[in-house]
Amino acid sequence: MGSVTVEVCCYTLEWNAQHVHSENLAGKVILELGSGSGFFLRRIYDALPEDAVYIAADHDPGKLRFLKGILEKAEKRKGVLFICCDFPQIPLKARSVDVLYDFTGTSNFSFEHREFLPRLVERFLKTEAELLGSYIIFRNFSPDSMVPIDFRPNFQIHSIKKQIEELGFIKKAEYTSDVVTKGGFAVRLASIQKSEWLNFTMFLTGRSIAVPISFQRITS
């Protein structure tokens, strides 16, 4: 992948990592959607409190085994659970998750699914859960785009923001990366067309997407 793409992806990772504060995670249950080979988890692993429970969920058993093997070599063991399943069928109790991490998990899911992934796991989130997410945002779609028309709202910033707000989250911080025009990274960017431009957008929210966006959830 080109140097611009590497720089953008690295900054996206760092933006998210800077919004992970260990003092706010003590005793919390954290769920990461689409943990893959642990690109995000490995970056923040040392910041996780020993009494936090981190659930790394992915549908690819090979990636989870790879991640587990790496973390087993860490100097300190943290409370990480590896769950391989379809996201809507994660074996968790309702309202058990304090923090949701979504480092392009929804974006990767959206290449093959119409549903907005956080909606499918909303029942697991506590009333005052927080969301830290990074999302792939297409600035335009080429005529031969790999993204089906019906799936495109999950790659458009206004639609992502709207769906996050409908889940009761209020934005605390937001960052949008520079434009990416070449493929690469641990997502399906290798298949973007030359005429397609995209960004990463990050959110930090609370009630509680990847460009990083953070929201705080509203309670009535």
Image (cartoon, rainbow, N blue to C red):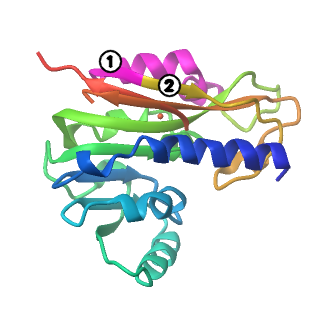
Nearer the observer, 136 or 177:
177
Identify the residue at image location x=15%, y=55%. 27
Quadrant assignment, res 5: top right
Q: How many marks?
A: 2
Residue 166's label in the rendered image is 1
Mark 1, Cα crowd under 10 Å, few <14 / some 14-19 / many 20+, is: few
**Does residue 136 lie above or below 78 as drawn?**
above
Identify the residue at image location x=35%, y=26%. 215
Reading the image, the residue beneath label 2 is 174
Q: Main secondary structure of the magenta part?
A: helix
* Residue type, numbered disc 2: Glu
Q: Residue 176 in the image: x percent, y percent?
A: 61, 27
Mark 2, Cα crowd under 10 Å, few <14 / some 14-19 / many 20+, is: many
In front of the other: label 2 or label 1?
2
Q: Residue 170 in the image: x percent, y percent?
A: 32, 19
**Which one is earlier in the sequence, the residue at label 2 or at label 1?**
1
Horizontal relation, residue 140 to residue 92: left or right = right
| Span colored in magenta | 149-172
**Does residue 134 lie above or below 22 as drawn?**
above
Residue found farthest to the right: 194
Horizontal relation, residue 124 to residue 151: left or right = left
* Residue type, numbered disc 1: Glu
